[in-house]
Image (tube, grey):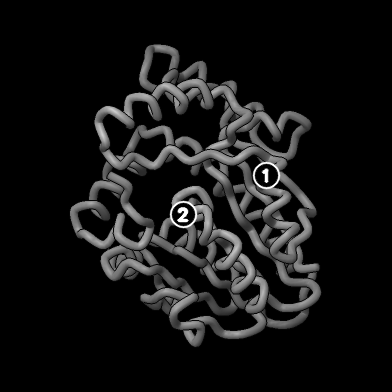
Amino acid sequence: MTISYSDRFRQKDAVESYDSKEYGSGSYSTAIWQLQRPVLERILKDFRRERTVPVRLLDFACGTGRVLASLEPLVDSAEGIDISENMVAAARTKCVKARLLVGDILASPELLQKNYDVISCFRFLLNVEPEMRSRVLRRLREALRMPDGRLLVNVHGNSRSLRHPAIVWRRRREREEKSGAMLNEMSPAETKKLLRETGFEVVRQFGFGILPPTLYRTPLRKAALVVDWSLAGDHWWNDCSIDMLFVCRPC
């Protein structure tokens, strides 16, 4: 059974599971976030240092507020939008000053203000149905300040990474179990093509996580952490990283 993005996190128990398991203590996703967070904060600090006017942030598909809570202290004003009321309820417990909204920006375009300086969009592209990606990205571009706004978007499943064989195997099992697991992937080239077609130019790329996540559930966890820490960031092997962060400007 395929579960749509808009339905996946509407239930409270799904939201609680996301926070406690996907981003629970010791999880692979938490380890990757610990690599991403300082890089993301540095990008925003550098961006704000170059501006003499107030910086407005939108965290699109803000979920439970993980990214927004980290970034809101670094900007003058912040907003978060998510389609799930339960996700936003969880975000309200983490965020201090951000304005939080519930809704679908395609069905209700008035949810978006104009001229955001920075829009962050994490774990959305792979979770949403492929046919929705370009529609949402074009809508976000319309809301971004021209010409010097920035879109910070990640793809948390690179089809050119060492994680890919495990995803292929899980897809085969998924056809038998029909669990509704999210197993989408995109390559760096596919992501850049999508961004280019929707009006964005990639100006910088970061990578996080080289080794397969399964190693984090073995006695080799500490060694895997050391390797992934040493290879995280802006390096030539970014195209091999499992989780990719793209810094884009509108064009």
Circle 2 SS class: loop
Please, what is the three-letter code of the amino acid marked with disc 2?
Glu
Q: Earlier in the sequence, mark 1 or mark 2?
A: 2
Residue 196 x/y as whole percent: 75, 57
Task: Determine the residue positioned at 49% across, 43% down.
Answer: 33
| Residue at 26%, 65% in the rendered image | 86
Cα–Cα gap, marks 1 and 2: 15 Å
Q: Residue at x 73, y 82 (%)?
A: 53
Q: Amino acid at mark 1?
A: Glu
Q: Quadrant of the N terminus?
A: top left
Q: Judging from the image, what secondary structure is the residue with disc 1 in?
A: helix
Q: Position of residue 104 (x, y in %)?
A: 42, 74
Disc 1 packing (10 Å; few <14; some 14–19; many ≥20): few
* Extreme residue toward the bottom, this view: 110
Residue sitting nearer the eye, 50 or 154? 154
146 w.r.t. 123: above or below = below
Q: Which mark is residue 45?
A: none
User: Which residue, given by chain and number where applicable, does mark 2 sit on?
Assistant: 129
10 over 213 or under it: above or below: below
Q: Residue 190's mark?
A: 1
Residue 121 spot, x, y in % from top left: 55, 60
